[in-house]
Image (spheres, rainbow, N blue to C red):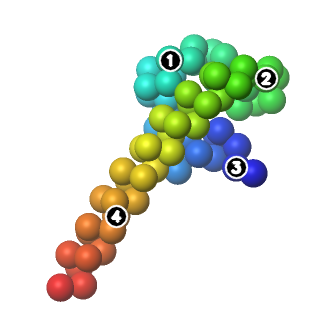
Amino acid sequence: METLKELRRLAGWTQMRTSHKSGVNRAKLSMAECGEISLSIQEETAIRLALLQAIRHRAEQIGRVIAGAQK
């Protein structure tokens, strides 16, 4: 299973942006990524939803670039 840090990197987001978009404190996110604490189910869900939306958006952008290059 992918970690939050891996998802965040795929999204191209910093911890600050992830914190802002998910509503989870940046320090708490950092500690969770390092395995120092566990997030609540609600916090982890909020982070994952925000990151997955960003990853989908990035994938769509990449798809448009590839489609344009093939023309």
Contact check, label 2 and label 1, Cβ < 8 Å: no
Q: Looking at the rendering, which quadrant does residue 67 occupy? A: bottom left
Can residue 40 be seen here? The reply is yes
Question: Label 2 is placed on what type of residue?
Answer: Ser
Residue 12 percent across, percent down from the top left:
46, 45
Measured Cα–Cα span from mark 1 to mark 4:
27 Å
Question: Label 1 is placed on what type of residue?
Answer: Gly
Q: Nearer the viewer, residue 50 or 68?
A: 50
Q: Identify the residue at image location x=52%, y=50%.
A: 10
Mark toward the start of the polypeptide (4 vs 3): 3
Measured Cα–Cα span from mark 4 to mark 3:
21 Å
The answer to whether residue 37 is left or right of residue 60 is: right
Residue 4 percent across, percent down from the top left:
65, 39
Measured Cα–Cα span from mark 3 to mark 1:
21 Å
Measured Cα–Cα span from mark 4 to mark 2:
33 Å
Contact check, label 4 and label 3, Cβ < 8 Å: no
- Can you say which quadrant of the picture contains the C terminus? bottom left
The answer to whether residue 65 is left or right of residue 42 is: left
Contact check, label 4 and label 2, Cβ < 8 Å: no
Q: Looking at the rendering, which quadrant does residue 35 occupy? A: top right
Mark toward the start of the polypeptide (3 vs 1): 3
Residue 18 percent across, percent down from the top left:
49, 29
Which residue position is annotated with label 4? 62
On screen, residue 23 above or below 57:
above
Mark toward the start of the polypeptide (2 vs 1): 1
